Image (spheres, helix red, strand yellow):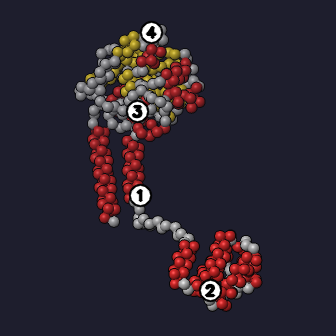
Amino acid sequence: MKNRTTYIIIGVVLLLLILLAIVGKKGSMGDDKLSTRMAKSSFSSKDKKAGGAYVAFKTLPELFIRRSIQVVTKPFATTYARETELRYSGNNYILVANELFTTEKDIEAMMEYVAIGNYLFLSVNKIDPLLAKKLECKIEHGSNYQPGTPHKVQGYKDKTVPLDTSYSYSGMIATSYFSEIDTTYTKVLGSNFKGKPNFVRVVHGRGCFFISLNPYTFSNYFLLEKDNIAALETQMSYMPDNAANIYWDDFYSHQFSAQSGDFSEWQVLMRYPSMRWALWLAVLLLLLYVIFEGKRRQRIIPEKPLLANNSLEFVDAIGQLYYQQHDNFNLAHKMTLHLLEYIRTRYYLNTNHLNLQFIETLSKKAAMPENEVRELIDMIHNIQLAGAVSDEQLQHFYQRIQHFYLNTK
């Protein structure tokens, strides 16, 4: 009982420590929401911190006629295989992430998706080298930094519109740019703070790729400063506003390394802190249950040995005892009582009347010839009437009884 109480106290203390850790983490998360640091921007549609894309996601429905935005949480190849509508033209697909980690299947699906007449908008700091090679682009990747003071971060220029404007804020500055493009299919639409091209349109088949190397233009911090929301409107204006379907990718923004193995639904669940905490809490509760309920509540019942049939040994011992005293009649009487008890318990027969009916019934149940059973019963009657038994008679009686024990069922 004392040990069980100790385990309960330890379990309660551990649970309290975990709850305190969760509360402390929530407090620090609350501080992060107020922070303008963007070194670890998530670009997630659900993230309301400075580096999240919550504002952009909520603004998108106002920029298109069909105001329903479908959120994608699987790799592009998987989504393209499952969503039949993506294999028709007139769809917009928006992907915002820090770094784009794709597979060959993803890239093949992207190329096919655009070629049939769809639009794919990619806004990332680092694009997959294989995809850049497919689009005949070369990119110079630089180190992003956050000066903390208002600074020009993005410009847009397009003579066909016409458009020539720039936007600034105090957040993270992206320094990557396109160092080489195929001007036959590619057109520059924007530039970074140094005037280097960082936003292009690449025509492929009947559709277009839009590639921006400044995903911070989708961040909450950028869009909520001054009238920078117009920068989002400018970028989205190149895609048709009457698209049949609009997709927002929330998978690659949570990818921090190259994909390995097959994608599973479990990976999606493990991205979210609340799901991870729920999982670990469930594991802890299961562990506590095993500790407390796994212990026996009742003392172990000792195993009792099987009872051995020592009847014959008992008869031999009694026989030796009475033989030494040479009381043959008493010994024959004891042997008779033991025999009758054996018949009652084994064959369920009444031994009060050892008559012909008894002999006939016992012969059938014991599967023994009736004449042998009659001979044994007659010997019992003779001994009881005689009142005395010689050694030869006792020995013959003992042999008949043993013969009955050994030859009956």
Tell me which corner region of the image, top left, top right, bottom left or bottom right, holds residue 258.
Answer: top left
State the image coordinates of residue 185 (x, y, percent, origin top left).
Answer: 48, 11
Quarter of the figure with the N terminus:
bottom left
Q: Is residue 104 above or below residue 269?
A: above
- The residue identified by callout 4 is 183
Give the number of the mark in front: 1 or 2.
2
Amino acid at circle 4: Thr
Q: Is residue 78 above or below residue 17?
A: above
SS state under label 3: helix
- The residue identified by callout 3 is 254
State the image coordinates of residue 145 (x, y, percent, origin top left).
Answer: 27, 24
Q: Answer few, some or many: residues within 10 Å of disc 2's Cα (few below 14, many 20 plus, some between 14 and 19).
A: some
SS state under label 1: loop
**Camera-side residue: 195 or 123?**
123
Give the number of the mark in front: 3 or 4.
3
SS state under label 4: loop
On residue 294, the disc is 1
Q: Is residue 398 left or right of residue 272?
A: right
**Camera-side residue: 217 or 128?**
128
Q: Answer few, some or many: residues within 10 Å of disc 1's Cα (few below 14, many 20 plus, some between 14 and 19).
A: few
How far apart are labels 3 and 1 at the CA level? 40 Å
Amino acid at circle 2: Val
Tell me which corner region of the image, top left, top right, bottom left or bottom right, holds residue 347.
Answer: bottom right
The answer to which of marks 3 and 2 sits earlier in the sequence is: 3
**Camera-side residue: 386 or 276?**
386
Residue plotted at (73% across, 76% down)? 372
